[in-house]
Image (cartoon, helix red, strand yellow):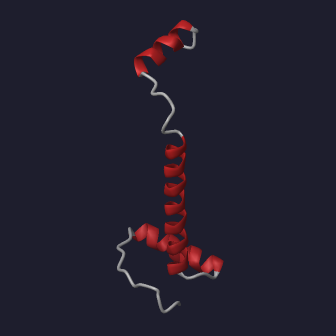
Amino acid sequence: MSPLTKRATVYLDPALHKALRLQSIETSRSVSDLINDAVRDELAEDANDLALFEARKNEPALDFEDFVKGLKLDGTL
């Protein structure tokens, strides 16, 4: 454990806690490592989503009603 590691109290659903303990045993990794990896993955996914939004911010807005009308006109709906 790094000296910069912070301790936190997290309340888990009993079934999730059991699943984490079992996965910890199967993978020979601590529950803390599993939770850290899960949080890291979730934050990375959020960062990726934000980057995609930023890349598409200049795209023209699409009106929902016009889009549905187009689907009807081309026979999709």
- As drawn, is 59 to the left or to the right of 64? right
Is residue 66 depicted above or below 11 in this figure?
Answer: above
Residue pushed farthest bottom? 3
Residue at image x 45%, y 68%? 16
**For residue 65, which quarter of the picture?**
top left
Residue at image x 55%, y 64%? 41
In this view, the residue in front, 26 or 39, is 39
In this view, the residue in front, 11 or 76, is 76
Image x and y of residue 21, in percent: 52, 77
Q: Count the labels in the image.
A: 0
Residue pushed farthest right? 27
Image x and y of residue 31, in percent: 51, 79
Image x and y of residue 72, in percent: 51, 10
Is residue 5 depicted above or below 48 in this figure?
Answer: below
In this view, the residue in front, 68 or 28, is 68
Residue at image x 40%, y 70%? 14
Residue at image x 53%, y 7%? 73
**For residue 75, which quarter of the picture?**
top right
Is residue 62 depicted above or below 16 in this figure?
Answer: above
